[in-house]
Amino acid sequence: MTISKMKQKFAIIMALAMVLFWIPCESVFASNTNMTISGGVLTAYNGGGGAVTIPSDVTSIGPNAFAGKPISSVSIPGSVRSIGDSAFANCTALANVTVPGSVTNMGSGVFAGCSGLSSVSMQASISALPASTFNGCRSLTSIAISAGITSIGSGAFSGCSSLSTMSVPAGVSSIGDSAFANCSNLSAISIPASTTNIGGSALSGCSSLSTINVASGNSAYASDGGCLYNASRTRLIMVPVGKSSVALNSATKIIGSGALAGCSRVTSLTLPNGLTTIESGAFSGSGIRSITIPRSVTSIGSQSGWSPDVITGYSNTAAETFAASAGYTFSSLDGGSSSDSSDDSAEDDSSSSTGSTSVDLGEDTSSSGSSGSNDDVDEEGAGSTSIDLGGSSSGSGSSTGSGSSGSTGSSSGSAGSGSSGSGSGSSASSSSGSTGSTGSGSSGSTVVKSGSTGSSGAYAGTTSNSHTLDETPKTGDGSVDPKLFLIFGLVFVGCGLMIVGKKQGV
């Protein structure tokens, strides 16, 4: 072999090496090697975290795909149509996210437990915000929800303790059980005219809530003085627990079950003339020490966890009977003497009861008896809406009629357990992730871990239909780029050919 021919071959080999050097690594090896992608479905992320860009050929993000991974940001392309259950659950380093309008289907708990998530732009083309979507996102301060959403699922924002105000988008007709439960910093919420169903315990545990505003024209609800009523304001549904004083609307006929439950800052209350019914659990757990009950009240249900200093009212009325039966001090407004209820007062109590008075002291019952046609008017005004927002009372009835909050209480329980279940599930799935040191990568690229627990070889991988999970060190993680192995190999071969040629020439 002549020297000129050897030089020619060596030049060809070097040219090939240079071409390979400029070809992106993804074109030589499997692309997006820190993700497992098959048939357009991203089923697992195996990188070391940081900023992540999902490839444009991905059409679906599978359940738990990124769960528990230390990603700080994620770019979801317009090609994605579906996001599975708990896809990003417990990604505690994730700070902000935009869900594009291309997404038409979302599972439950997609961002549950993302404690560092502070802002979200929900542009997804979905009609319902799934259950537990942002459950436990305690850093969330702002949320932009797409106009097409008509319902908010149970526990969707439960535990978002940094959320200070919330305007439910126009068009939302239903707010699920515990949707905003334990949003401890939420001070005000606005409900649009379209909302006709608010689930049980939707606002329970919102200790700072002082204002509920309902848009005019709502056929099921109304607000007055920051409190929630039925549309005709004949039934008081909820007094926000953050309020320190309450003046009830003069049209109020019924104080619903759990209406002032947990209102520890309200210490005194004067009920309006014309009120007829106080349902079971209306004052349970409240801080009311003194209350004035008008003569018009004919039915008072049991009030667990409530111990007023004095009940003021008229003799021979439901107020006096209730006070005597429950052992509370009664102060008469019509010249009668005050009396401390004791064992000796039982006979007076029975003689002072009137035929139209109903006093319910049973623990797990709700007051369904009320006098006159006012209650019928109230029930018609309440329609088919759910009215238990506090979740502090117990029972087993629906709260659309007589106001028992039992069924909504149990609904809240199931919603809570559901969200915690999804959280633990995603946590379990993320615990199997690989460990190892991560290198620094170029901005905008994902990072690949350099070690894997349980793998028998130096590097382990699996193969899918369209992409291969290859954990060979890349430039992105600070290790040797595999292209260099090819280049060095070609140079080595070229040098070998030159040496062989020289020997042959000799």
Image (cartoon, rainbow, N blue to C red):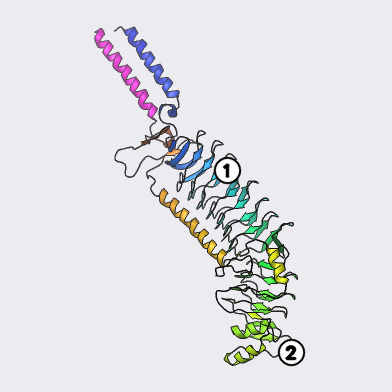
The residue tagged 1 is 98
Q: Which segment did they paint magenta?
A: 481-506
Q: Amino acid at mark 2?
A: Gly
Q: Position of residue 499 (x, y in %)?
A: 28, 14
- From where the camera sits, is residue 336 visible? yes
Residues marked 2 and 1 touching at CB (< 8 Å):
no
Q: Position of residue 469 (x, y in %)?
A: 39, 36
The residue mark sitting in front, 2 or 1, is: 2
Q: Amino acid at mark 1?
A: Thr
Say which quarter of the image contains residue 81: top right
The residue tagged 2 is 335
- In the figure, 238 relative to 1: above or below? below
Say which quarter of the image contains residue 376: bottom right
Question: Which quarter of the rendering shows the N terminus?
Answer: top left
Left or right: where 294 falls relative to 95: right
Q: Residue at x 65, y 90 (%)?
A: 351
Q: Position of residue 432 (x, y in %)?
A: 38, 48
Q: Position of residue 358 (x, y in %)?
A: 64, 80
Tell me the tag on residue 112: none
Residue 241 falls within the magenta-colored stretch: no
Disc nearer the start of the sequence (2/1): 1
Question: Which quarter of the rendering shows the C terminus?
Answer: top left
